[in-house]
Amino acid sequence: MKLDNTLPLEYRSEENSNRIFGFWLFLGAEIVLFSTLFAVYLTLWNRTGNGPSGHEIFEIGPVLIETFLLLTSSFTIGLAINSMRQGFKKATLVFFLITLLLGLGFLGVEIMEFVTYVHEGATLQTSAFLSSLFVLLGTHGAHVTLGLLWGGGLMLQIKREGFTLDTANKSFIFSLYWHFLDVVWIFIFSFVYLKGLM
């Protein structure tokens, strides 16, 4: 295996570069998935039937907290990758942990938000609007949950093995995934919550 030591560790082998390229293709498929969910939501956002509208159930407080937590986690995963590239194992693990804790906080606020909606009578069965809302938010939340499990596993692997071609590659791919979730959230914040609050 020929290594190019001028490149960051995650790119040094051809296999690693191919994995990163393959993950970009996977993210392309994820873009199609979320585009479809957004299209469904934007088609049904005013089909509230006898149920509440977004204006009636959305609260800006929890949404701003979720946004702050997730966007801050995007910054900290960037710091983790930067630390990894400089060979700072402890700093990498600390930034990974902060990222995952912020993601966990985001998930906690989202779950509380869902519980509040259900207590107000806003469920999947209430209206087409709410069905599309819950599916969109739930799909994003499921992706965050997967990211938390994935990131936790990566932390254990880095702690055990240190920085190798494999762990560096996996960490960088994880950071791409996490940034993607943040970008999706910006669209949710803009086209679901801000639109609904107007």
Image: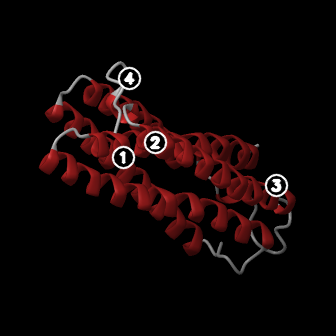
Residue topped by disc 1: 170
> Residue drawn at (13%, 50%), measured in percent from left and top?
160
- Quick check: can you spot residue 10? yes
Side of 43 where 61 appears, left or right: left
Measure how far apart labels 1 and 3 are at the Cα level. Answer: 35 Å
Residue topped by disc 3: 42
Measure how far apart labels 1 and 4 are at the Cα level. Answer: 16 Å
Disc 1 residue type (three-letter): Lys
Q: Kindly state the secondary structure of the residue where label 2 is placed.
A: helix
Residue topped by disc 2: 70
Q: Are marks 4 and 3 in contact (CB under 8 Å)?
A: no
Disc 2 residue type (three-letter): Leu
Query: Which dot, 4 or 2, sits closer to the camera?
Result: 4
Q: Measuring from the top left, give residue 179's x and y in whole percent.
A: 50, 39
Q: Kindly state the secondary structure of the residue where label 4 is placed.
A: loop
Disc 3 residue type (three-letter): Leu
- Of residue 131 and residue 75, the one placed in the foreground of this image is 75
Label disc, if present, on residue 7 of the rendered structure = 4
Q: Measuring from the top left, give residue 75's x and y in whole percent.
A: 40, 30
